[in-house]
Image (cartoon, rainbow, N blue to C red):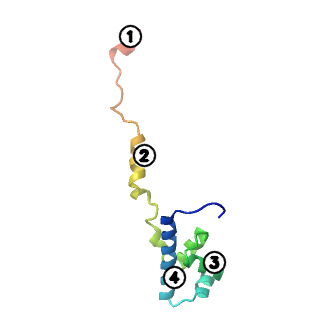
Amino acid sequence: MGNFSIPPQVSERVTLLGQRIRVARIRRGWSVLDLARKAGVNRNTLTALELGKPGTSIGVCLTVLWVLGLEKSLDAVADPDTDVHGKALEASRRPTRAGKRRKTRNDYDF
């Protein structure tokens, strides 16, 4: 990842997601190798995901969630309809209109 460092709040979220994936795997009675094979990834990659290593690709993460049947849990992630801050910013940039300008008699006065 080079010089890039993630904020502690993000690191906590990545770790929590990895823990949740691990719990889902264990509840299904699958070993790390079982889930890795089903997802088409290396066992070490799956272990890194479960440990919350931030360098694990989002593609691997989404594939593992799909194999676990949990991909629908992502539907609310970055949903534009729930982006209150973004919607407020967008609305503040919209031009305000008082209505369509009407022509007056003077507009035709040459």
Q: Which residue is mark 3?
A: 45
- Identify the residue position indicated by label 2 in the image: 90
Who's the residue at 48% across and 78% down the image? 20
Position in image of residue 35 (x %, y %): 58, 84
Looking at numbered disc 2 in the image, what kind of residue is underneath it? Glu
Where is residue 107 drawn, in percent x and y?
Answer: 38, 15
Chain-order first, disc 4 or disc 2: 4
Task: Give whichever of 12, 27 is nearer the camera.
Answer: 12
> How far is disc 1 from disc 2 in space, using C-alphas?
40 Å
Q: Is residue 22 above or below residue 60?
A: below
Type of amino acid under label 1: Asp
Q: Do the CB atoms of the residues marked 3 and 1 lie less than 8 Å apart?
A: no
Q: Mark 2 vs mark 3: which is more N-terminal?
A: 3
**What is the CA distance from the residue labelled 4 to the residue labelled 3?**
13 Å
| Foreground tag (4 vs 2) | 4
Task: State the SS at label 1.
Answer: loop
Q: Determine the residue positioned at 51% across, 74% down.
A: 15
Query: What whole-number distance in Å separates the C-alpha atoms at marks 2 and 3?
Result: 39 Å
User: Does the residue at mark 1 contact the one at mark 2 (Cβ under 8 Å)?
Assistant: no
| Nearer mark to the viewer, of 3 and 1 | 3
| Quadrant that contains the N terminus | bottom right
Which circle marks residue 22 in the picture? 4
Given contact means CB atoms under 8 Å apart, are the residues at marks 1 and 4 in contact?
Answer: no
Between disc 1 and disc 4, whose residue precedes? 4
CA–CA distance in space, label 3 to label 1: 77 Å
Residue kind at label 4, given as amino acid type = Arg
Mark 1 neighbour density, 10 Å: few (under 14) some (14–19) many (20 or more): few
| Eye-nearest disc, 1 or 4 | 4
Q: Which residue is mark 1?
A: 109
